[in-house]
Image: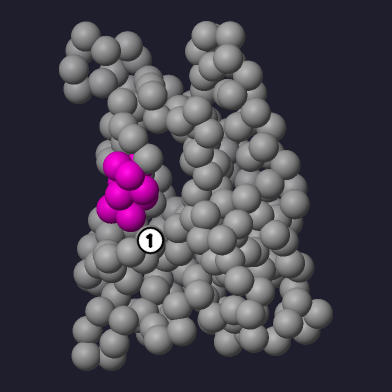
Amino acid sequence: MMSTISKRRKNDKLPMLKFKLIDAGLKPYRGALQLQEELFNKNIAAKLVHQPTQNHLILCQHLPVFTIGKSGKKENIITGTDNLNAEFYQTNRGGDVTFHGPGQLVAYPILDLDTLRIGLAKYISNLEETIIQTLLQYGLKGERIKDAAGVWLHDEMGERKICAIGVKASRNITMHGLAMNVNTDLSYFDKIIPCGIADKGVTSLQKELKREVNFEEYKKVFVNAFAELFDLQ
């Protein structure tokens, strides 16, 4: 499914912004990576010749796969890469090792930060805030932790990550993104030290609410929050 969403910026003197929403469904990691790279490279090429870029938001779920970022450490894969019972990819995103699988909403924004008039730090903050706003609608308080990108829950049960973030940016064009645990099988995380952080846990919306969450409903909540935070409703 693909649709185009547009909105005039709050400052009427700025031009109309547009982005394409691509709902890719359940998609193998390689296919999603190829789609990202195609859109990312088109935007880079456009910028080099001063042509307009196109903002995209890709949403999908993945078949079970572990990915590790460019700063990741193989020792954070507890079982070793041969015993993961899932695909494994070394990627060029930031961050360490994480898991993607069915029941997890993966979002890959391919955005031109120059058109949004924000820098990389603000971009990552907006991604985190998008998740924080969705959690509020489910009665949960998401939090940030210093020097650890992503969104966490923190209470008497301790700190546990519900959303991982790892991005890449070149010429202010972004790729990769975030992975929000909605109904994710968390047992896969036992095979790794998620994001290289050994003293904190991992959770999901399903685990926190003690019920399976309507995935399509959450997806709509996410898109609405994303559009609002990036002024692209």
Q: Is residue 8 magenta?
A: no
Image location (x, y in percent) of residue 91: 66, 55
Image location (x, y in percent) of residue 232: 34, 31
**Quadrant location of residue 187?**
bottom right
Instruction: From this view, report whether residue 28 is shown above or below residue 148.
Output: above
Q: Is residue 179 visible?
A: no
| Quadrant placement of the N terminus | top right
Number of other residues with Cα within 10 Å of mark 1, as a class: few under 14, some 14 to 19, many 20 or more: many
Q: Nearer the viewer, residue 25 or 180?
A: 180
Instruction: From this view, report whether residue 192 is shown above or below residue 11.
Output: below
Q: Is residue 164 visible?
A: yes
Which kind of residue does numbered mark 1 sit on? Answer: Ala
**Quadrant location of residue 223?**
top left
| Quadrant placement of the C terminus | top left
Q: Nearer the viewer, residue 124 or 205?
A: 124
Instruction: From this view, report whether residue 60 is shown above or below residue 122.
Output: below
Question: Residue beneath label 1, please?
Answer: 149
The magenta segment? 121-129
- Taking the image as shown, residue 210 lies to the left or right of residue 167, namely left
